[in-house]
Image (cartoon, helix red, strand yellow):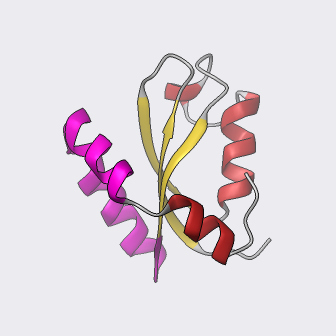
Amino acid sequence: MELRNYTYIIECSDGRLYTGWTNCIEKRLREHNSGRGAKFTRGRGPVKLRYLEISDTKSDAMKREAEIKKLTRLQKERLIHSGSLEKILSDLKISV
């Protein structure tokens, strides 16, 4: 697992969307699904990765997280549908 800086959106089992950032998406998803992730996602698992983007720095990923969190649900859904999650996962050989 290579460490990178990611901003991501996951969908909880109740349909709610959560946005976060991490430097290891595989580990972060395991944390969310085991109940050790964010307080928001505890008890809402399993979660499914819906969106992922790569940032050059931790600071950039955190800024992007803050931007996405300000979006409405509809805007987040549009972002999810405009993204290329499968391609990113394939290109980086990430299995989630």
What residue lies at 55% left-to-right and 27% top-to-bottom? 41
What residue lies at 46% left-to-right and 49% top-to-bottom? 20
Q: Is residue 79 magenta?
A: yes
Q: Position of residue 7 (x, y in %)?
A: 46, 60
What residue lies at 51% left-to-right and 40% top-to-bottom? 10
Q: Quick one: quadrant of the N terminus?
A: bottom right
Above-or-below relation of 93 to 34: below
Above-or-below relation of 94 to 67: below
Q: Position of residue 42 (x, y in %)?
A: 61, 23
Determine whether, in the image, residue 32 is placed left or right of residue 76.
right
Q: Which residues are magenta?
A: 54-82
Q: Is residue 88 visible?
A: yes
Q: Is residue 84 magenta?
A: no
In this view, the residue in front, 10 or 23, is: 10
Q: Position of residue 68 (x, y in %)?
A: 28, 51
Q: Is residue 23 visible?
A: no
Instruction: Find the residue positioned furthest to the bottom.
Output: 56
Determine whether, in the image, residue 74 is placed left or right of residue 62.
left
